[in-house]
Image: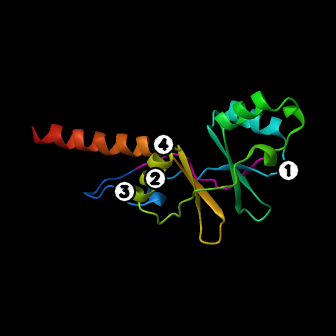
Amino acid sequence: MAKLLSESEGTTDIQMSGNPPTCVAEVMTRNVVALSPEQSFQEAITLIARHRFRHLLVTDAKGHLAGVISDRDLLRFMIREPHWESATVADVMKSDLVTATPATSLSAAIGEMLSRRINCLPVVEADGRLVGILTSTDLLRAFQQIQEQIEQRDAVDL
């Protein structure tokens, strides 16, 4: 069974008091669904389809990040693996991970995402415990809120 690691809502609400967000913790999604490596490949497909996720995070029994699976990883695996029905999450997950911490600057996180051409960064504490995920959608949502605040401020100045 997938486990929910946090109860907070997965939305970003930036209150710009002259200061835009500067660190990952301010815009990351905390509402993270994680799978264990032993879970079935079919469970991963079901989660992606049901919740419209593009990325699934995989954790060990202690909540430490073990891997990441993207929707594209699932599709590629199905194409090249004739017996994918019997596969586990461990068979498809990527374990060479690029991560951020809650304190990572947004510019550094965005730089990593752009240079590696990836759309998410799992967010972990120093001990490797998963605490969230930073996605391109989180960044666009934050940008939209900042832009709306700028536009509202400029409309008042007119």
In the shown orientation, is residue 43 left or right of residue 124? right
Q: Callout 4 environment at 10 Å: few (<14), some (14 to 19), or many (20+)?
A: some
As drawn, the residue found furthest toward the bottom would be 127
Are the residues tagged 3 and 2 within 8 Å (C-beta)? yes
Nearer to me, 62 or 151: 62
In the shown orientation, is residue 118 left or right of residue 7? left
Q: The residue under label 3 is which amino acid type?
A: Pro
Earlier-in-chain disc, 1 versus 3:
3
| Secondary structure type for disc 2 | loop
Separation of marks 1 and 3 at Cα, in angstroms: 37 Å
Q: What span is in magenta?
A: 1-13
| Secondary structure type for disc 1 | loop
* Magenta-drawn stretch contains 3: yes
Q: Which residue is mark 2?
A: 27
Earlier-in-chain disc, 1 versus 2:
2
Image location (x, y in percent) of residue 147? 29, 41
Q: The residue under label 2 is which amino acid type?
A: Val
Image location (x, y in percent) of residue 126? 59, 71
| Secondary structure type for disc 3 | loop
Q: Which residue is mark 4?
A: 136
Res 21 label = 3
| Secondary structure type for disc 4 | helix
Separation of marks 4 and 2 at Cα, in angstroms: 10 Å
Q: Which residue is mark 1?
A: 38
Question: In this picture, is 48 found above or below 8?
Answer: above
Q: Callout 1 environment at 10 Å: few (<14), some (14 to 19), or many (20+)?
A: few
Earlier-in-chain disc, 4 versus 2:
2
Q: Residue at x 84, y 33 (%)?
A: 84
Separation of marks 4 and 1 at Cα, in angstroms: 28 Å
Q: Nearer the viewer, mark 1 or mark 2?
A: 1
